[in-house]
Amino acid sequence: MSRSVQFFNESEIAFPLSEARARSLVVKVMKALGKQAFEVNVIAVGEEDLREMKKRYFDQDVYTDIISFTIGEEPFLEGELYCSPERIRRNAETFSEPEAREFARVLIHGACHLCGFNDATEEERREMTRKEDAFLTQFYDT
């Protein structure tokens, strides 16, 4: 059973969490969401690059901290998570969270999207937040 999480940094800002810890977190979340075989690439890009991707692929001109793309689903999930360490840093300041914990939350959020969870409606956003909080407690805060 293949479980792979790779990291690529095209940003000027380093990942605020060690790759080993981030990889372990993503693997645990994916397994908890029922995915046994997967390959996930986490790519850090500048916040303007991520904004352009959000416009191009989602027709939304907004800044964001992560975008998820599911490439293949069954029986082997392939996905890409594009994140902005710069935006994550700002969010951490805004929410008075340690930067590494905010990065963990964003990775969890992206993994949930890869597994089919959405946050387009208020109810979906509440459910996504519940999942993020539960996985942070279960896999990060321990």
Image (cartoon, rainbow, N blue to C red):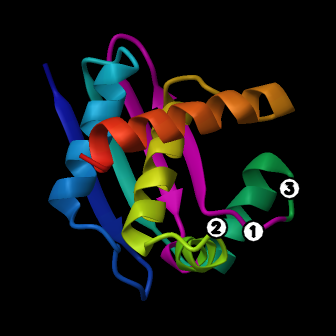
Is 33 located above or below residue 18 in the figure? above
Identity of the residue drawn at 48% across and 63% down: 102
Question: Mark 3, residues whose alpha carbon is within 10 Å: few (<14), some, or many (≥20)?
Answer: few
Circle 1: residue type: Tyr
Quarter of image, res 136 = top left
Image quadrant holding the N terminus, namely top left
Q: Tell me the magenta residue range.
A: 62-86
Q: Which residue is at the front of the view, 120 or 53?
A: 120
Determine the secondary structure under disc 2: helix
Identity of the residue drawn at 29% across and 40% down: 139
Task: Kindly identify which residue carries mark 1.
Answer: 63
Task: Kindly identify which residue carries mark 2.
Answer: 50
Identity of the residue drawn at 36% across and 14% down: 34
Q: Which residue is at the front of the view, 134 or 125?
A: 134
Residue 60 has which mark?
A: 3
Residue 37 location in percent, x, y? 25, 21
Is 58 located above or below residue 101 in the figure? above
Judged by depth in the image, the label closer to the viewer, 1 or 3, is: 1
Residue 67 location in percent, x, y? 60, 51
From the viewer's perspective, is 35 left or right of 11? left
CA separation in Å, label 2 and label 1: 7 Å
Is 75 located above or below residue 32 in the figure? above
Q: Earlier in the sequence, mark 2 or mark 1?
A: 2
Q: How many tags in the picture?
A: 3
Asked whether the residues under the numbered discs 2 and 1 touch, taking CB atoms below 8 Å apart as contact, a structural biologist would say yes
Q: Earlier in the sequence, mark 3 or mark 2?
A: 2
Determine the secondary structure under disc 3: loop
From the viewer's perspective, is 29 left or right of 115? left
